[in-house]
Image (cartoon, helix red, strand yellow):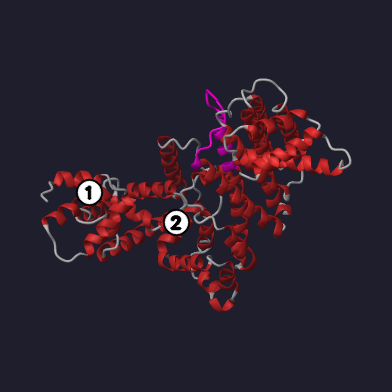
Amino acid sequence: MNVSESTINDLVARLPTEEADRLFEELEQLEGDTARRQAVRRALVAKLNALRQQHARRLFTELFQRYMTRDSTLLRPEFASPGTLHPLDVGALWIRLVDKSIGPFARQADAMLAERAQSRPLRAVFGLPEVVALQADLAKRAAEVLTATLGTAGAVRPFLEETNRWRGLEAKRTRLGFDPRPLTIDDLRLMQGVLAQGRAMGELHEQLRRAARDPDALAAMVGNPAQGLDGRVAALVPGVGVLAPLALLHVDRNYIAGRMILLHGPQPWQEPTVMALTRHLGRTCFALTEEILGAMGVGQLVRPGLSLPLARRDLLDRELGNLDVILSLFEDLDLINHMRYGSLARDFLDRMVRRVEAELYPMLEERCLMEGRSASRPIPDFEALDWTLAFCSRWRAVLKRSLFWGTGFSSFHDNVVAGLRDAYRGCFSRNGYASASQRLAHAIRLAQLGNRLGAEAGSWMGLMDPGLTRTVAQRLKEPEPLSGGEAALARSVLELAMEELRRTKHWRDPALQQFAEMAEARLATE
């Protein structure tokens, strides 16, 4: 086939980045070369490198890659934690270094990398021997500048001021939404240590990360003197070695690893690890609160109901799982009662609980009330309401073991369940329904919501309510197949009827006997 280069470019442009990367690797493995393969290769390189500018800066950033978190919440001052490095921090350092001293070298590096990137993706360029050497030279020059700055009286303050000024402007440009916590001299020392001892740091971090896949293996590594961990940490720049285990928290969110570090790791690692875990508890509480309020539409001009797309549900599930792990750790190690960090942890929890209960509970009560009145169809956000009630129960279960103060959950639970129960009973007595099927559908929805809070709709039913058996009997007489929910409800009513008939075996209500026989016959065919 004769395919023009413009057509090849159009086709490649539609590929996902991962597919384009994989296709380039496959082309590199093929023997021989043709004009068409060359055209495809050029198109793939153009696509993969299109958004990758400032190559020298990217090469510099790669030096910190394994230690960097992209969680912008950790940039908030209230969650400032030792060992936190963010792309915003490394970018600010790069800008300051280029402005201060390494500008000419950076421009030479950019030109070299741009030339190499014409024929291969930047990822592959970074693996070339000459580029690996270039990166090592770049790290050495940057480390020398930072070492000189840190060792010169009066040089650190203006360096930090300029660096933090750029971070503030960049935060506004990218609409971060808050002023990031300022970099300190300790942050400069950490970055200087990574640049000066990158290889030793990298080996330590990778060994920890591999061991962290199995908590027992990590405990053996950090707690066994034969591993020589203390000596390796002592050989690093003071205070820098702790960055390796802290990256397990900040980057990987591996809180089980944090537990093993506290129980078995070197003593200098323990205080920073406790501090980091406490701040992560705070950021998790904050993230849960913000996502819940976002689902409610807090701050929006119009709040039509709950909005819970799949991505938000997944995020809430992940954060609740993180909260569960961290609180288990705090409870097991008695950190929740720690004089300093325990009070901070309880404050984070208290703020989350009070904000969520003040905003979410009233809305859930109102939405359940609306569903109770919606006879003909579910309310628009019924599915989101159903999921949120279940989430509330799971959230409360996670918090229950660590809360030492009263909350509004019991009152909220009782109010919602009572409202759902009354609406459920009304399904079989009040006007406004077009058919028995509609009555049952509404009752099933209300029972489902109650079940999310641990309520059993079976306890809401009773044969003293004539509307219940009448509605079920009417539905059983209709020829349309029963839904799963209808069949389950009908079986529950049949069980009540059979129990009553066994109790009154010497005198049986004829109408109840007739209902039981009809229900048994119909349900046997379902």
Residue furthest to the bottom: 226
Quarter where residue 479 is shown = top right
Q: Which residue shows up at 65% across the image and 38% down it?
A: 448
Query: Taking 424 as reference, is 136 left or right?
Result: left
Does 380 appear above or below 164? above
Residue closest to the eye, 456 or 347: 456
Which region shows up in magenta? 286-311
Numbered label attached to residue 46: 1
Task: Tell me, yes or no, whether the highlighted magenta stretch contains residue 304.
Answer: yes
Residue 102 seen from this side: no
Three-letter amino acid code of the residue under disc 1: Ala
Tell me which residue sits at (64%, 52%) in the image.
324
In depth, the one of 187 and 305 nearer the eye is 305
Identity of the residue drawn at 73% across and 31% down: 468
Sequence-first disc among 1 and 2: 1
* Residue 476 visible, this orientation: yes
Mark 1, secondary structure of its residue: helix
Residue labelled with disc 2: 191
Image coordinates of residue 216 in percent, x first then y, are 59, 70
